[in-house]
Image (cartoon, rainbow, N blue to C red):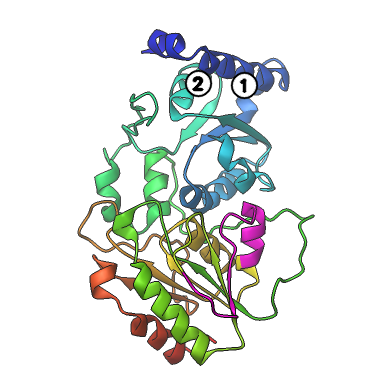
Amino acid sequence: MFFFLIFRDHKILFSIFNNFLNLMQKINKNEHKDFIIVSLTEHIGDIILVEPIIRELKLKHPNKKIVWCINAKYKSIISFNLNINEIITVKVFAEWILMNLVFRNFFMIYDLHIDQKPCTRYFIKGTNPNKFNYNSSDVIKCNNLLHFFCISGSLDFITNERPVFYLDPNISTNSIFEKYIVIHAKTNLTSKDWNSTSWNNLIKEISALYPDYQLIEIGQEPQIDSVLKNYSSYCYKLSFQEIGLLIKKCNLFIGLESGFSHLANSFDVKRIILIGEFGNTKSFLNPYSGYHNDINMSIINRFDLSKEVNPSDVLNIISSKHLL
């Protein structure tokens, strides 16, 4: 496997060597024992929600340096985390699989990836067994996704804290609008989505009922086709840090189960989350930690959002809980 990957792409070998050399240059003899490497390379929501693990590791090992291995395109998510001392970046998951073979001989490692997670580029799987032999289909046995990652990482603790998202302290704190609602209407899985017709009908109703609020859509693929004066699309227009600040200051977040909903959870803003089929399972799951007596969180959980949820369901929550 190792030589096959090098033959296919020698840049992987160079990246592994470079990461290892850079890390070893920062430590003296025997000081490698003072480093803890945490690896979770993707995706946005998972990276945000496991932040309490980093916090807990720092509390348990205050004198150790925390190193996070992450996909380069997600680096900005953790760049300002005060509990992380170093960041190692990779471009594909196979890179971490091979890097782990080297690093585990020198460092304490907590690999949070699901056992048998595949690399979508090279089609090899990472081996990361846990004492419960859990894989992706066992996530429904856990209290939430953070609980699942604690097990996947073979941690000696289970935490249910709400994640903290660390914003760039130099980012502008000026609000774009005085009062606004953030909408996220498209995930990377069709099975988790609500249909665009329902989103557009919801936007029209909210605009009519709450005309003083600006409606801002975020995400990579806009779903709302509106000429309303109080609607704006910020899809593709903001950095992740800017989106974080936008969500932190919003009056209400309405969205699907995604990385942005985990951002909303981290800031504990008022939020309505629509959760469809989760991980090809037919069981309901609350993905969010810190969700005990949480008056700000409302979840609409249905197997088929498009068939089972109407705009009136969202509007009723806004009205009954006086969210606006």
Q: Which residue is mark 1?
A: 19
Residue at point 56%, 59% (across, down): 235
* Relative vertical location of residue 172 with respect to residue 14 in this rendering, above or below: below
Q: Residue 158, image x and y in percent? A: 43, 51
- Quadrant of the snapshot with the C terminus: bottom right
| Element carrying mark 1 | helix
- Residue 258 visible (yes or no): yes
Q: Which residue is mark 2?
A: 99
Q: Residue furthest left?
A: 282
Residue at point 77%, 55% (across, down): 169
- In the picture, measured across the screen, residue 28 lies left or right of residue 121, that is right
Say which of 193 and 288 sits in front: 193
- Residue 161 visible (yes or no): no
Q: Residue furthest front?
A: 227
Instruction: Say whether marks 1 and 2 touch (CB < 8 Å).
Output: yes
Q: Residue 174, image x and y in percent? A: 77, 69
* Relative vertical location of residue 36 with respect to residue 210 in this rendering, above or below: above
Say which of 218 and 285 sits in front: 218
Circle 1: is it few (<14), some (14-19), or many (20+) Cα within 10 Å?
some
The amino acid sitting under disc 2 is Met
Residue at point 59%, 31% (across, down): 89
Say which of 322 and 182 sits in front: 182
Residues in magenta?
225-246
- Spatial CA distance of label 1 from label 2 is 9 Å
- In the picture, measured across the screen, residue 51 lies left or right of residue 23, that is left
The amino acid sitting under disc 1 is Asn
